[in-house]
Amino acid sequence: MLQNERSSFVNFALKSCSMSKKGWILVGFFTVLVLIFYFALTRLIPGFDKKKVAPVSTVKAFFFTNQDGQQVTEKM
């Protein structure tokens, strides 16, 4: 029974995901178009692919009182 369920699922997946040749050509065309666009941006705009903001790597001092009445800080 499990084998029958698997084969029916595979058949369903293949039938529902099948695309025409034109559909695959369009998917390929737009994928290449996006890649060319990104490549052009990295070449034409200096620093486009560089990070502009340094990551926040410090936690400022804080404390609050939890529901048990104990103070919680950044150091725990």
Image (spheres, grey):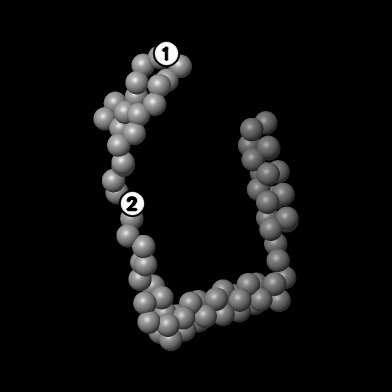
Q: Quadrant of residue 9?
A: top right
Q: Are marks 1 and 2 in contact (CB under 8 Å)?
A: no
Q: CA distance from mark 1 to mark 2?
A: 30 Å
Label drawn at residue 56: 2
Question: Could you tell me which quadrant the N terminus lies in?
Answer: top right
Q: Secondary structure at mark 2?
A: loop
Classed neighbour count for the residue bearing mark 1: other residues with Cα under 10 Å, few (<14), some (14–19), many (≥20)? few
- Relative placement, left or right, of 21 versus 75 is right
The image shows residue 60, relative to residue 55, as above or below, that is above
**Amino acid under label 2?**
Val
The image shows residue 29, relative to residue 19, as above or below, that is below
The residue lying furthest to the top in this view is 68
Q: Residue at x 36, y 62 (%)?
A: 53
Q: Residue at x 68, y 55 (%)?
A: 14
Q: Quadrant of residue 44?
A: bottom left
Is residue 32 visible in the rendered structure shown here? no
Q: Find disc 1 in the rendering and name its residue.
A: 68
**Amino acid under label 1?**
Asp
Question: Could you tell me which quadrant the C terminus lies in?
Answer: top left
Classed neighbour count for the residue bearing mark 2: other residues with Cα under 10 Å, few (<14), some (14–19), many (≥20)? few
